[in-house]
Amino acid sequence: KCRACAAVCPTQAIEAGPQTLALGAGCTGCGRCQAACPSAALEVKGFEIDAEAVISGHAIVNVECQRAPAGSGALRVPCLGGLSDSTLLSLCAAQARVVLVDRGWCGTCESGGAAHPAQATLDRVNGWLAQVGVPAPLRPCIAPVAPGAATQRADIDPMQSQGRARRGFFAALARPASEAPHSA
């Protein structure tokens, strides 16, 4: 009923009915629906992050779009816009400085837009961290990379890398109760 997922979808790929959700063909797998869902009912592959394992001794953790070249040493996610408040906070709580790497692609990506897709999440998280006394230099930030530093990988198809988890979820929501699978 809340329709938060449909409201944040940059491609309007989610149709929210009175009792159902349907995922359209325009889905890019960015994960913004998952990040916006207040009940954590949605799961998008690629955002499963074990903060302790990722950090393990690193003072700084760079987080990048999966389209960044492999081997950058960064934590790569389908889209920085899909990082939820809780994911970003868990990375911060693991005692590392979190840097969201901006390669300048978001403005031309269909999952991006004029504003950086992670800016609203970053603003909320930094507001909370400021309230509890975390100094500004230790809070997460967006760091632009110099143009030409690396090119976007052309071989990444966001939907293919996401699997069909969300489609199955939405299909199950749309299925009438009489057709629901039964456990044996």
Image (cartoon, rainbow, N blue to C red):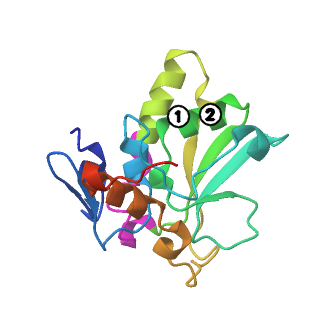
Question: Which residue sits furthest right?
Answer: 57
Quadrant including the N terminus = top left
Q: Amino acid at mark 1?
A: Ser
Q: Which mark is residue 72?
A: none
Residue interval drawn in magenta: 106-120
**Magenta: main secondary structure:** loop
- Left or right: 78, with 49 as reference point: left
Q: Is residue 9 magenta?
A: no
- Left or right: 79, with 32 as reference point: right
Tell me what residue is drawn at x 40 percent, y 69 percent: 28
The local secondary structure at tag 2 comes to: helix
Is residue 148 shown above or below 32? below
Question: Which residue sits furthest left?
Answer: 18
Residue at image mark 1:
86
Name the spot of residue 182 as percent of width and height, x first: 43, 50
Label 2 CA crowd tier, 10 Å (few <14, some 14–19, many 20+): some
Tell me what residue is drawn at x 51 percent, y 75 percent: 160
